[in-house]
Image (tube, rainbow, N blue to C red):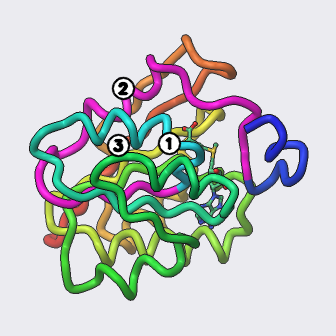
């Protein structure tokens, strides 16, 4: 992770992998059935934990740095794909219950972030969750953008035992908005 951070800090977003405390907090919000989409899987610290959950049958790991694919492919139940912007086409008719994301959205332009949020909303089912962490205290997405995409912020939790400390945001898709 350190080498990839030095090579491309904006894309990698972190010097070291998430702590087990952060992984546990992220995982505690998933709907543990069927297919899970993981964005920005890195070397698979969250993926490996997801794969141990019996009711999870498939994990689509979106990771745009091919260096990480080798370790992701070794993890049970994993289908390893590339850029998150290929997600919409693959899953838009499937309607998934959980997207768990480590994508460093703070480094994205406003337009790219808006496109990503729209794609994530398209593939999420009514009641489905988007779980995202960031190293900042504030929500990575704007209120207006969230509303347009029928996403409601339902939980915010600070995880101090991570380097650096992180905040987990949980959003729920509500088609009735
Ligand atoms: C902060 S790391 C998270 C790694 C791991 N999930 C963790 O929590 O330790 C973010 C990851 O997102 C990946 N990433 C950044 N932009 C991406 C994109 N557009 N599509 C897919 N992956 C992306 C980076 O390559 C990096 O591995």
Q: Earlier in the sequence, mark 1 or mark 2?
A: 2
The mark closer to the camera, 3 or 1, is: 1
Q: Earlier in the sequence, mark 2 or mark 3?
A: 2
Q: Does residue 100 appear in this view?
A: yes
Q: Which residue, given by chain and number where applicable, does mark 3 sit on?
A: 170
Q: Disc 1 vs disc 2: Cβ atoms closer than 8 Å?
A: no
Quarter of the figure with residue 1: top right
Q: Which residue, given by chain and number where applicable, does mark 2 sit on?
A: 25
Tell me: 57 left or right of 145: left
The kind of secondary structure element at disc 2 is: helix
C-alpha span from label 2 to label 3? 11 Å
Tell me: 151 left or right of 55: right
Is the CB–ligand 1 distance for label 2 below 8 Å?
no
Q: Residue furthest top?
A: 161
Q: Earlier in the sequence, mark 3 or mark 1?
A: 1
User: Residue 176 in the image: x percent, y percent?
Assistant: 14, 71
Q: Residue at x 28, y 53 (%)?
A: 77
Q: Residue at x 31, y 34 (%)?
A: 27
Q: Which residues are magenta?
A: 12-39
Q: Residues within 10 Å of mark 1 (few under 14, many from 20)?
A: many
Q: Is residue 90 above or below residue 21?
A: below
Q: Does residue 177 appear in this view?
A: no
Q: Residues within 10 Å of mark 3 (few under 14, many from 20)?
A: many
Q: Residue furthest right?
A: 6
Q: Disc 3 vs disc 1: Cβ atoms closer than 8 Å?
A: no
Is the CB–ligand 1 distance for label 1 below 8 Å?
yes
User: Residue 100 in the image: x percent, y percent?
Assistant: 38, 49
The kind of secondary structure element at disc 1 is: loop
Q: Is residue 64 above or below residue 10?
A: below
Q: Which residue, given by chain and number where applicable, does mark 1 sit on?
A: 44
User: Residue 32 in the image: x percent, y percent?
Assistant: 15, 44
């Amino acid at each position: 992770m350190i080498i990839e951070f030095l090579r491309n800090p904006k894309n990698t977003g972190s010097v070291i992998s998430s702590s087990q405390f952060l992984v546990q907090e992220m995982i505690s919000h998933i709907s543990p059935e069927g297919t899970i989409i993981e964005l920005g899987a890195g070397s698979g610290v969250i993926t490996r934990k997801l794969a141990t959950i019996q009711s999870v049958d498939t994990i689509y790991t979106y990771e745009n740095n091919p260096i990480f694919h080798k370790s992701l492919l070794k993890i049970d139940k994993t289908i390893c794909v590339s850029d998150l912007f290929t997600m919409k086409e693959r899953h838009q008719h499937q309607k998934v219950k959980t997207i768990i994301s480590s994508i460093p959205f703070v480094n994205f332009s406003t337009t790219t972030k808006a496109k990503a949020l729209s794609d994530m909303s398209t593939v999420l089912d009514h009641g489905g969750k988007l779980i995202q962490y960031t190293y900042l205290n504030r929500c990575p997405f704007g209120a207006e953008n969230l509303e347009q995409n029928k996403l409601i912020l339902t939980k915010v939790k600070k995880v101090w035992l991570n380097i650096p400390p992180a905040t987990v945001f949980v959003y729920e898709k509500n088609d009735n908005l």
